[in-house]
Image: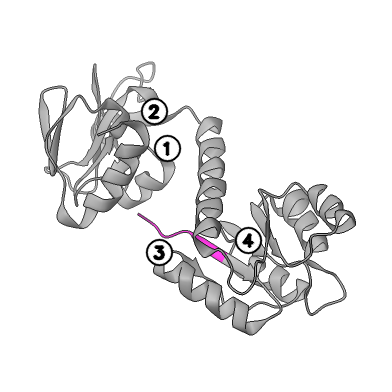
Amino acid sequence: MKNKHILIVEDEWIIFDELASFLTKKGFEVSLYTKSYEEAINSIKLQIPDLVLLDIHLQSEKDGIDLGEDLSRKYNIPFLYLSAYSDEVIVNRARRTNPDTFLIKTKPDIDKEQLAVSITMALSKTTSQSDSEKEGIFVYTDYYRDVKQVGSNELKKVLVRFDDILWVETDMEKRNYLLFQTSKTKAYFKNSLTKIKELLPFHFVRINANQVVNLKKVEGKINHSSFKIQDKNFRIGQNYSDDVHKVLHSFYYE
């Protein structure tokens, strides 16, 4: 699973270093030290982050709320405030920028676990919104070379809705193809498993080197390392187990 990229905009190096170390241990990628509005904009132009963690007081004429307004209106990047400021005027001004949340810097230590939860919830909300914008994908009815030979009035591509996909796997006969399996048919897509995973909703999880499955279609577990979808057994690779079970447990109690 690709690590989410976090941009921390914070004027105090000690706080940045503490937060960056914590988030890195949690599996996030963190941008370099960014302490001003201008540095933040330049960083975003180089790489769009998945989320911005934003202080209000910055080392620039424009403050974090100015940046938050740009993140909301121009860039559509989720962000949350982490600030020592809590007076009503500042909070109301910040609220108008539509942050995902506003956290107060507590002393002597920031509640980093609560911060991690807030970040995860904000990212999950963004993922769900992104998922809802797309309903499916057009795929080939056969291998690309073969489908070019069909009549001009015959279907070359079909729409497969995400809800109908059971799993996607590397075609073992033609390794540069993927096989899409639905409850009714098979279809093909010329791309890598890594690339297609980025297009699929979050409940599609890579379980080994060759397969991505729709965890909403799981019918039962055989044991901790394997489960079943439509009478087909799937084995979870050791390197993928943590990610699989995190998503699985977001849908089902165990």
Say whether disc 4 or disc 3 marks the residue closer to the N-terminus.
3
Marker disc for residue 52: 4
Local crowd size for mark 4, using a 10 Å CA cut-off: few (<14), some (14–19), many (≥20)? many
Q: Is residue 154 above or below residue 88?
A: above
Local crowd size for mark 3, using a 10 Å CA cut-off: few (<14), some (14–19), many (≥20)? few
Which region is colored magenta? Answer: 1-6
Whether label 2 touches label 1, CB < 8 Å = yes
Q: Secondary structure at mark 2?
A: helix
> Where, by quadrant of the figure, is residue 138 drawn?
top left
Q: Please report the residue visible at 59 percent of the width from the left and 68 percent of the height from the top.
A: 110
Q: Residue at label 3?
A: 27
Local crowd size for mark 1, using a 10 Å CA cut-off: few (<14), some (14–19), many (≥20)? some
Instruction: Name the residue nearer the viewer: 170 or 197.
Output: 197
Q: Secondary structure at mark 3?
A: loop
Confirm whether residue 192 shows in the render: no
Confirm whether residue 153 shows in the render: yes
Count of numbered circles in the view? 4
Nearer mark to the viewer, of 4 and 2: 4
Q: CA distance from mark 4 to mark 2?
A: 29 Å
Residue 175 in the image: state x and y as whole percent.
18, 48
Say whether disc 1 or disc 4 marks the residue closer to the N-terminus.
4
Along the horizontal axis of the image, is 77 left or right of 232? right
Instruction: Name the residue nearer the viewer: 220 or 187.
Output: 220
Residue 220 in the image: state x and y as whole percent.
17, 27
Q: Residue at label 2?
A: 162
